[in-house]
Amino acid sequence: MVVRQYAVIGLGRFGTSIARRLHEAGQEVLGIDINEERVNDAEQYVTEAVIADATEKKSLVSLEVDTFDCVIVAIGDDLQTNILTAMLLKELGVKKTIAKALGRRHGILLEKVGVDWVIYPERDMGERVANQLLSPNMLNYIELSKNYNIEEIVIPKHMEGKTLRELDIRAKYNLSVIALLRDGEIIVTPPVDQEFEKEDLLVMIGHRDDLAKFSSL
Ligand code: ADP
């Protein structure tokens, strides 16, 4: 596994979730917050945590944020602080910057500043919840374009014990099965005579409407 270096600025709920997950996955994570208590709490789930004001250029310089692979601005409600931090990161030449936006206008400003990936946590979570409701058997998805997704879908009950050939998923549902996940193992491009078992997860690519239909079977 490639180990990358991440810095997460702002250790509220959003920043904490990102930092914790990356650290669990074996990545190097520096947590930065202006609040001492948050920094102390973070010590259990990051590689290193430091108290610093991210709007002070000299603090960011001394932390050498420009040497990190990716820096995430997870500062919450304070728009000015969030944007100023993002600007400083760009000015210091950080390779990849990610920032949380509160809304569309805030997001436009962050894009103008040159942030590589602007995240709208509430909008995105809302969409995820709606998608989950539309596709109850779908566990995870990647949006490839406006209409096409890759989704992980639990095999419908009536397909258990059948093979890919018998089910003819490509012709009947207009979807391609690119992998099969079983007991934590992955079978890439499963053969046509592969028999499906209970709780198999199909990784499929296709139009989101076709995927929604399949995951509601
Ligand atoms: P969430 O909505 O993700 O819970 P919060 O607003 O609670 O977000 O958390 C934002 C975090 O950002 C807080 O822990 C706060 O102390 C931190 N923060 C705010 N301003 C700065 C700053 N200038 N430098 C570093 N951290 C900051």
Image (cartoon, helix red, strand yellow):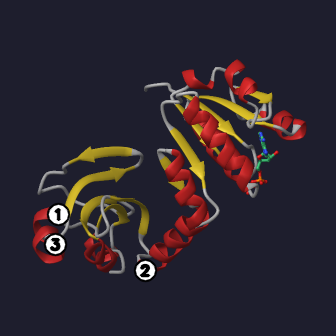
Q: Quadrant of the N terminus?
A: top left
Residues at discs 1 and 2 in contact (Cβ within 8 Å): no
Whole-percent x and y of residue 180? 29, 53
What secondary structure is found at the residue carrying circle 2?
Answer: helix
Q: Indicate which disc, 3 or 1, sits on the residue closer to the N terminus.
A: 1
The residue at which mark 3 appears reads as 174
Binning the other alpha carbons within 10 Å of mark 2 as few (below 14), some (14 to 19) or many (20 upward) gives some
Position of 67 compared to 170: left or right?
right
- Residue 156 visible: yes
In the picture, the quarter occupied by the C terminus is: bottom left
Q: CA distance from mark 2 to mark 3?
A: 18 Å
Residue at image point 28% right, 70% down: 147
Mark 3 and 1 residues: CB-CB less than 8 Å, in contact?
no
Foreground: 153 or 4?
4
The label nearer to you, 3 versus 1, is 3
Asked if 181 appears above or below 23 in the picture, the reply is below
> Given this view, does label 1 or label 2 mark the residue nearer the observer?
2
In the picture, measured across the screen, residue 133 lies left or right of residue 146, that is right
From the Cβ of disc 2, is ligand 1 less than 8 Å away? Answer: no
Residue 168 higher or lower than 177, as above or below: below
The image quadrant of residue 194 is: bottom left
What residue does disc 2 label? 134
> For this view, does 45 lie left or right of residue 165?
right
Residue 88 is tagged as none
Mark 1 and mark 2 lie on one chain; the one further toward the N terminus is 2
Snapshot quadrant of residue 59: top right
Does the residue at mark 2 contact the one at mark 3 (Cβ under 8 Å)? no
Q: Residue at x 56, y 52 (%)?
A: 110
Residue with the mark numbered 1: 163
Please state which amino acid type lies under the numbered disc 3: Asn
Q: Amino acid at mark 2?
A: Leu
Alpha-carbon distance for marks 1 and 2? Answer: 26 Å
